[in-house]
Image (cartoon, grey):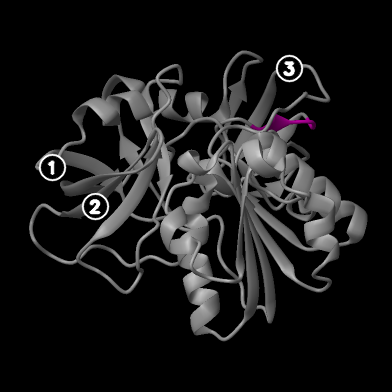
Amino acid sequence: MTEVSVRVIDRTEEADAVFALVLAAVDGGQLPAWTPGAHIDVAVGAAGVRQYSLCGDPADRDHWRIAVLHEPRGRGGSAALFRTALPGTTLSVSVPRNNFELTPAARYTFVAGGIGITPILPMIAAADRAGADWTLHYGARSRAHMAFADVLATDSRVRLVPQDEAGLLPIAQILADRPGATVYCCGPEPLLAAVEAAGARGGVTVRTERFVPRPVVPTDADTAFEIRLAQTGRTMRVAADRSIVDVLESAGIAVLTSCREGTCGSCETPVLDGEVDHRDSLLTPEERDSGATMMLCVSRARSGVLVLDL
């Protein structure tokens, strides 16, 4: 990843098991610009790299803010940051990348679950500045698990739905109540799946973001195929047990990649010919059907050859 060296200048507890970090450039300069919905990759030592949404003010080029859900039984990234990301600590992060861009609309419905509130915070601020009609429905296990709830609760357009008090978010009703609204949702997989399904039934435009891979049941068994690099004419074989990224890196061809599980979008590459077996968690059904791009870290080929714009 393209690295930016930042220092933790503040750390606060925002909810049960959620802590926020305020970051500043180590060299004292301005940080790269970003837009609502953007995230950064954070190096977390032996645990690799994790993605965290920026949840501060895009106009503040001196500081970035992220919030981390501490999962002691998770994959190790949040546990590493919980132990080590203290004020004064230096972190290696990426420049911001946005796979969850807020597109202009007259009406928005925002739906957040748990730590999924983080990319939504700058979105509702941007929608407010644009004069758009918006609502936010925010669910979590309990009020104690709702990060930034104290500030959000002061706005009449925000509905807080603690599960232990009010049950699960009524997704179908939320979408039905606001016809014509563009829906943005971030949160755990069951919530994302429910919103996507309700949106599909109602013909509603839904945008979601995942930081863990979408459950994928491959329609085809993993088999070998070839990739042809259009810019050099070079052809390489991708074995059934290897990814395209593995093959390219073994051949000394640099590939921008971070998560290696189809969630961050850094390895998205144009496809010039061939049929893709998409296994990422980012592309929309329409984008998959077009076959114009693919995520090299997880997706494979249905055809014998894929021609890549590399």
* Residue at the extreme front: 165
Disc 1 residue type (three-letter)? Pro
In percent of the image, x 52 and y 44: which residue is there? 143
In percent of the image, x 60 and y 32: which residue is there? 213
In magenta, the rendered stretch is: 299-303
Could you tell me residue 195's position as x and y percent?
A: 76, 49
Q: Nearer the viewer, residue 247 or 295?
A: 295
Q: Are marks 3 and 2 in contact (CB under 8 Å)?
A: no
Q: Nearer the viewer, residue 53 or 218?
A: 53
Residue 223's label in the rendered image is: 3
Q: Which residue is mark 2?
A: 22
Q: Which residue is mark 1?
A: 87
Q: Secondary structure at mark 2?
A: strand
In percent of the image, x 70 and y 28: which residue is there? 215
Q: Nearer the viewer, residue 72 or 292?
A: 72
Q: Are marks 2 and 1 in contact (CB under 8 Å)?
A: no
Disc 3 residue type (three-letter)? Thr
Q: CA distance from mark 3 to mark 2?
A: 46 Å
* Residue at the extreme bottom: 131
